[in-house]
Image (spheres, rainbow, N blue to C red):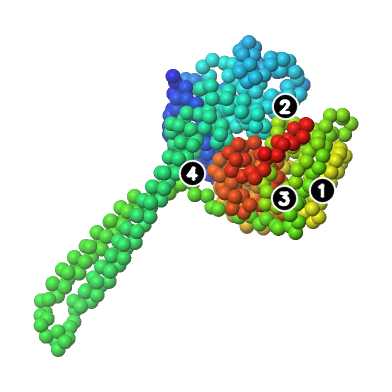
Amino acid sequence: MAQINVTNLTFYYEGSFDNIFEDVSFSIDTDWKLGFIGRNGKGKTTFLNLLLGKQEYIGTIHTSTIFDYFPYKVTKNNMDIPVVDFMDEWKVNCEQWRVICELDKLGMDAEILYRPFGTLSHGERTKVMLAVLFSGENDFLLIDEPTNHLDWMSREVIKKYLSEKKGFILVSHDRDLLDACVDHVLILNRESIEVQAGNFSSWWENKSKKDAFSKGENEKHLKEITKLKQAADRSVRWADKNENTKIGFNPKKEPDRMINARSYIGAKTKKMQSRVKSYEMRMSREIEEKEGLLKDIESPVELKMMPLTHHKNILVSVKEYGLRYANTDKWLLENISFQISSGERIFINGTNGCGKSSLIQAILGHSIHKDFEENKLVQGILQEQGYLETATGLVISYINQDTSFLKGSIKAFCKDNELSESLFCALLRQLGMERVQFEKNMEDYSEGQKKKILIGASLMTPAHLYIWDEPLNYIDVFSRMQIEKLLLTYKPTMLIVEHDVRFRQQIATKIIDCNCSGTEQI
């Protein structure tokens, strides 16, 4: 068993206003199954790159282990040839028989290695990469968000596969995956880094108790500081009042006072002033003990949204509906029937490629939506059969899977989308984005930060129906829980494609299991 020792690590990007890491130290063992958790933009992927030696840094990272990283880089040329022809580019001296053994554990046939990589689905590409990744010996593996864009079935396969492995760091925001696959967690808190045995749920339970204790201690210190301050103020007033009587007196009003009483009054004043200094010292100790108590507490601000109420109860009606791409005989969807009523939060479940996003495109195409002209149904790329109707005057707020169109400044984005820049930035701050990010162009954001731009814009848009297509890809676990609370509070009408099991369990009022032969409403 080897160790990775990080000592006094400091790192910042050239031209950046803030440090990603500042004088942090910790140690991890290379036989751990380590979950890596933190808010978007806190430096998870950056730390993996530091381990790989891709960036210069201040401090030391000492280890004798060899690292390998998922996902592997795929070139344009790789897309046109079988994996077996270029997997040596991914992993030096990669042995084919070992890869085949790993594929078998992932439920995949070896023939997938002989198909052009570009013809593989997202799930197949992920499984092939993982098979190559785990085909080595004694490597410490850095796995960066392996389940993004994967359907529930593929996630279950990868969850089972990783739960039987060890010797890796897993960056993921999927609570179900983290609970099943890790035995230690590395947490990037707001101002510190901690390593703890257990999975996400055990860490979160411990953190909740620790945060509650810290808040209680903070309140106790605040009350004590207030009491000490009041006592000090009283003593100061008494000392000043007493000192003012030292010089001059009225013999008629104070016949018993003698001239030599002045020294007694001075001694009494000095004693009161000494008491004030004692109070101030005790206040300093209380303030010092209070400092740092709340620095890592996760207490996200409650978000708000403005759903509209439609005069009709049924907003979307679908009967015996089907979709296919033009000039093909195969139907993506067939014989689908369901309704979206006000207040429902419907999740569309199904494997990748079964037509979930196409169904969303069809609903948008039948409504008057801002992306109407770019819609695949409108352009004739998709063909339909059956019945699909949307309520008249239906206002839809839509989140696309794609974030590649996000470019330029926040100011320009707000202007294009008719959003208040100040309110929008305030909302992004509530979602955990730092103010310094607002000075950057959006193309320089992490994928999680880009997703928060889309989610923030949707939340600020008053709508009858919110359609979100895989909104949580790359979104950190703290923001996911924050969004869950928001949706349960405001109960907007929603149609969602999302494979996060915990999120779906919390939010869904109905699940439509979508496949080529129809739908099952659960």
Please state if 35 lies on the left or on the right of 263 as rendered.
right
Tell me the distance, in whole angstroms, between the alpha carbons under discs 4 and 3.
40 Å
Tell me where residue 453 appears, x and y as whole percent: 65, 47
Report the Cα–Cα distance between label 4 and label 1: 47 Å
Q: CA distance from mark 2 to mark 4?
A: 37 Å
Q: What residue sits right under mark 3 in the picture? A: 341
Q: Which residue is mark 1?
A: 389
For residue 266, above or below residue 443: below
Q: Of marks 1 and 2, which one's residue comes earlier in the chain?
A: 2
Tell me which numbered mark, 1 or 3, is placed earlier along the sequence.
Answer: 3
Report crowding for label 1: few under 14, some 14 to 19, many 20 or more residues within 10 A (C-alpha). some
What residue appears at the point 77 percent right and 48 percent down from the top-left corner?
316
Question: Dot 3 surroundings within 10 Å: few (below 14), some, or many (20 or more)?
Answer: some
Q: Nearer the viewer, residue 506 or 102?
A: 506
Residue 179, position as x, y percentages in the image: 52, 32
**Could you tell me if the residues under marks 3 and 2 are in contact, i.e. CB atoms within 8 Å?**
no
The three-letter amino acid code for the residue at tag 3 is Ser
Label 4 CA crowd tier, 10 Å (few <14, some 14–19, many 20+):
some
Amino acid under disc 4: Arg
Three-letter amino acid code of the residue under disc 1: Glu
Q: Residue at left 73%, top 47%?
A: 340
How far apart are the alpha carbons under marks 1 and 2? Answer: 32 Å
Distance of label 3 from label 2 (alpha carbons): 33 Å
Identify the residue position indicated by label 4 in the image: 190
Which residue of the protein is positioned furthest toward the bottom in this rendering?
A: 252
State the SS at label 3: strand
Q: Disc 2 marks which amino acid?
A: Ser
Work out whether 22 lies above or below 54: below
Dot 2 or dot 4: first in sequence order is 2
The quadrant holding residue 13 is: top right
